C-alpha cells in the first residue's frame, strides 16, 4: 500500500512538474500578447498625434474668396489670384516669357480630320466653361454646287506680332510676352469687351464664369515647363505642330521653307503667328464667326451686347 501511495505521489509530482512549464509558457504568451496590444495602441496614438502635428503645420490653401467646384475657376483657385503662382521660382516667366523665342503654331489642313480632339483637350486643360471655346474646329462646306467639298478650319488666338487687342484694352489686362504669347490677366480685366471687338479672328470671348475676356494662351502653363499645348499633344492626325520660329529646326520654321504657308486675314496687318498649310482661298478672308455667342456671354456678364445682337428665333 505504501508503495502504491508513494507511486501515486510520485506521479502527481511529475504532473505538477510538467504543468509548471506549461503554465509558464501560457503566462509568457499572455504577457506578450497584452504587451503587443499595448504597443499597437501606443503606436496608433503616436501616429495620430504625428499626423495632427503635420497637418497643422501645413498652411491651408487660400480659396481667394471664391466658391470651389464651378467650371472655369479650378485653375485660378489652385494657382493663386492671378493664376501665375509658380512664377516666383521661375523669375516671373509666366508674365515675361522666354527671351529670344518666338512661339508659333502650324496647322496642316491636309491632315486635319475634324475629330475635335483638340477642342476637348483644351476644355479639360484650361477648365473652359460650357458654350465657349479657346479653340474649335468649324465643319464647313465650301465651293458651289455641284463642285463642293467639306473643309475643316481649326481656330484659336493667332498671337499676332502686332496684336490689335492690346491697344484697345483700357485696363492693361492683356499684353504680349517676349516670346510672342499674348496673355490675359483676369484680375485686371474689367469685362468691357473692347478686345473681343478688336480681334479680327473671333478668337476672344467673354467668359461667363469670370465675367472677363478669355482666349487661347498657347497653354502657357505647359509651354513654360517644356510641354506642348494640349491641342497639339492630342491632335490625332498630327495636323497641329508647335515650336520656336527662331529655331530653324522647329516644325513651323521648317514648314516655311518647304510649303506655301498662309495666315488668316493677312490684309489686317496683325501678322498672325498661327500658320496654315492648305488654307482654301474661300476661308482665308471669310471666317465663320460666332457673334451670337459674344452677345449671349456679354449679357450674362451684365455687359452691353455690343454691335452683334443676333438672337435665336424660337419656332
Image: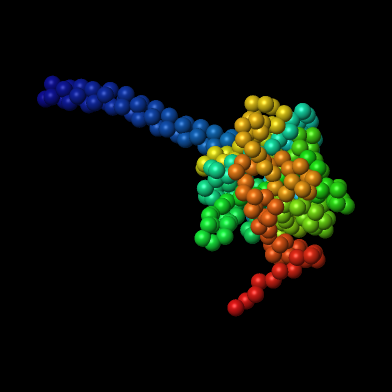
Place residue 182 in its image quadrant: top right
Q: Position of residue 249 (x, y in %)?
A: 64, 26
The answer to whether any part of residue 227 appears in the image is no
**Residue, x 54% and y 42% (percent of image)?**
111
Q: Position of residue 66 (x, y in %)?
A: 73, 54
In this rendering, position of residue 182 left or right of residue 243: right
From the viewer's side, name the closer residue of 217 and 249. 249
Place residue 3 in its image quadrant: top left
Q: Is residue 8 above or below residue 139?
A: above
From the viewer's side, name the closer residue of 267 and 81. 267
In this rendering, position of residue 204 left or right of residue 281: right
**Residue, x 58% and y 57% (percent of image)?**
143
Q: Is residue 103 above or below residue 196?
A: above
The color scheme shown is rainbow
From the viewer's side, name the closer residue of 171 and 178. 178
**Residue, x 79% and y 37% (percent of image)?**
177
Which image quadrant: the C terminus?
bottom right
Q: Is residue 113 above or below residue 32?
A: below
Which image quadrant: the N terminus?
top left
Amino acid at each position: 500500500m505504501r508503495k502504491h501511495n508513494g507511486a501515486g505521489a510520485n506521479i502527481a509530482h511529475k504532473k505538477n512538474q510538467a504543468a509548471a512549464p506549461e503554465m509558464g509558457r501560457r503566462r509568457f504568451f499572455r504577457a506578450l500578447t497584452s504587451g503587443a496590444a499595448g504597443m499597437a495602441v501606443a503606436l496608433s496614438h503616436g501616429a495620430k498625434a504625428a499626423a495632427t502635428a503635420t497637418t497643422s503645420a501645413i498652411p491651408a490653401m487660400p480659396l481667394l474668396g471664391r466658391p470651389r467646384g464651378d467650371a472655369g475657376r479650378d485653375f485660378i483657385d489652385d494657382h493663386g489670384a492671378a493664376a501665375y503662382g509658380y512664377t516666383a521660382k521661375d523669375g516671373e516667366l509666366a508674365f515675361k516669357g522666354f527671351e529670344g523665342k518666338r512661339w508659333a503654331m502650324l496647322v496642316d489642313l491636309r491632315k486635319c480630320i475634324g475629330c475635335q480632339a483638340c477642342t476637348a483637350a483644351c476644355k479639360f486643360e484650361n477648365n473652359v466653361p460650357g458654350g465657349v471655346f479657346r479653340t474649335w474646329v468649324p465643319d464647313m462646306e465650301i465651293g458651289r454646287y455641284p463642285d463642293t467639298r467639306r473643309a475643316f478650319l481649326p481656330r484659336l488666338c493667332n498671337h499676332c506680332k502686332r496684336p490689335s487687342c492690346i491697344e484697345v484694352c483700357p485696363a492693361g489686362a492683356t499684353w504680349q510676352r517676349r516670346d510672342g504669347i499674348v496673355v490675359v490677366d483676369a484680375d485686371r480685366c474689367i469685362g468691357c469687351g473692347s478686345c473681343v471687338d478688336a480681334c479680327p479672328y473671333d478668337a476672344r470671348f467673354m467668359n461667363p464664369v469670370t465675367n472677363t475676356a478669355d482666349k487661347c494662351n498657347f497653354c502657357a502653363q505647359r509651354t513654360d515647363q517644356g510641354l506642348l499645348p494640349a491641342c497639339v499633344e492630342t491632335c490625332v492626325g498630327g495636323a497641329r505642330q508647335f515650336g520656336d520660329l527662331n529655331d530653324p529646326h522647329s516644325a513651323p520654321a521648317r514648314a516655311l521653307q518647304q510649303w506655301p504657308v498662309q495666315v488668316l486675314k493677312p490684309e489686317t496687318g496683325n501678322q498672325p503667328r498661327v500658320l496654315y498649310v492648305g488654307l482654301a482661298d474661300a476661308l482665308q478672308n471669310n471666317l465663320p464667326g460666332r457673334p451670337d455667342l459674344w452677345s449671349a456671354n456679354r449679357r450674362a456678364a451684365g455687359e452691353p451686347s455690343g454691335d452683334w445682337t443676333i438672337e435665336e428665333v424660337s419656332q
